[in-house]
Image: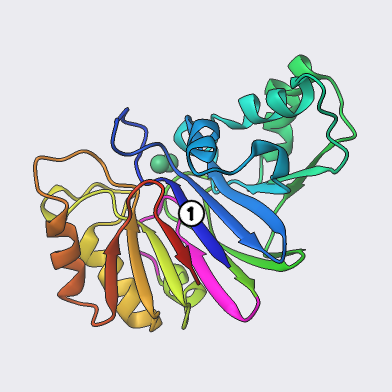
């Protein structure tokens, strides 16, 4: 799988870190995990086209993870001389269908092109297999484990420390975490860097990518140090437009 970090930031506007969004590609299929504000422009900066996205997996319905879905659909429907033939799957937590119906259908009408799926447990979207776990953050928030070609990436979405995250991340090749703060600034409903390291350690993952970074006066390197205190594997701080092959 090829991964591009489109946004390593949060809801706080930042010129350095866009709101959350990740591009994943395997066997010619391209998906987004989260689609926060600015994701469409980040895709352009990454040299990828919004026209080629096959599915979007949303972790939860907070705007920093979700807000560019409307511009994405608008662009797919309204780009001059472009006719989208393949369906776009939008998958996410419970409540997504109702949200779509209330917020999107009045604007775009009912469209055959768009398929909405609420994820309960697992979903196949070839060549990707996606499993999920509830997270401690918002009533609907999910974490995803995405496997393809024998490798696995776990996205915690927004999450607090939880045994279910450890189970979902078991032996994953890459764990991408909500690393909102260092321990001293820990907020409920988000992971601290130390907790990210602890989950990575207990789950036995190969690599840990710290993301969802709030702007802070504490240097970013402190997060890597804090996570590295409890996790022996490789700890990487996410940067926008960073690419990895997993
Ligand atoms: Zn968030
Ligand atoms: Zn959130």
Determine whether 244 is above or below 82 in the image: below
Q: Main secondary structure of the magenta part?
A: loop
SS at mark 1 in the image: strand
Q: Which image quarter holds the N terminus?
A: bottom right
Measured as percent of width and height from the top left, residue 41 is found at 51, 31
Left/right of residue 147 with respect to residue 3 in the rendered view: right
Does residue 62 appear anywhere in the picture?
Answer: no
**Disc 1 residue crowd, few under 14, some 14–19, many 20+, Cα 10 Å:** many
Q: Which residue is mark 1?
A: 4
Measured as percent of width and height from the top left, residue 229 is found at 15, 75
Measured as percent of width and height from the top left, residue 221 is found at 14, 57
Determine whether 18 is above or below 184 in the image: above
Left/right of residue 116 with respect to residue 153 in the rendered view: right
Which colour scheme appears in the figure? rainbow
Q: Residue at x 58, y 57 (%)?
A: 24
Residue 100 or 55: which is nearer the viewer? Answer: 55
Residue 173 or 44: which is nearer the viewer? Answer: 44
Q: Residue at x 71, y 37 (%)?
A: 51
Does residue 240 appear anywhere in the picture?
Answer: yes
Q: Where on the image, by quarter, is ligand 2?
A: top left
Determine whether 206 is above or below 88 in the image: below
Measured as percent of width and height from the top left, residue 132 is found at 59, 63
Residue 97 or 39: which is nearer the viewer? Answer: 39
Q: Residue at x 9, y 40 (%)?
A: 217
Which range of residues does the magenta coloring cover? Answer: 149-162
Q: Quadrant of residue 109?
A: top right
């Amino acid at each position: 799988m090829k991964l591009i970090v489109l946004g390593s930031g949060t809801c706080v506007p930042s010129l350095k870190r866009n709101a959350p969004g990740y591009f994943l590609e395997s066997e010619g299929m391209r998906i987004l995990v989260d689609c926060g504000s600015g994701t469409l422009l980040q895709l352009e900066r990454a040299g990828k086209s919004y026209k080629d996205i096959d599915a979007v997996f949303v972790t939860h319905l907070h705007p920093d993870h979700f807000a560019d879905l409307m511009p994405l659909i608008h662009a797919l429907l309204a780009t001059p001389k472009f006719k989208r033939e393949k369906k776009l799957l939008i998958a996410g937590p419970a409540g997504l269908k109702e949200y779509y119906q209330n917020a999107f259908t009045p604007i775009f009408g009912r469209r055959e092109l768009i398929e909405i799926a609420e994820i309960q447990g697992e979903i196949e979207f070839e060549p990707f297999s996606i499993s999920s776990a509830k997270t401690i953050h918002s009533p609907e928030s999910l974490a995803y484990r995405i496997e393809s070609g024998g490798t696995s990436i776990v996205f915690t979405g927004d999450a607090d420390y939880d045994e279910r995250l450890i189970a979902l991340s078991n032996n994953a090749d890459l764990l991408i975490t909500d690393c909102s703060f260092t321990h001293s600034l820990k907020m409920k409903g988000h992971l601290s860097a130390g907790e990210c390291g602890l989950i990575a350690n207990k789950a036995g993952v190969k690599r840990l990518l710290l993301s969802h970074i709030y702007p802070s006066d504490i240097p970013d390197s402190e997060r890597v140090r804090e996570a590295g205190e409890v996790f022996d594997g490789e700890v990487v701080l996410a940067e926008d437009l960073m690419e990895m092959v997993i």
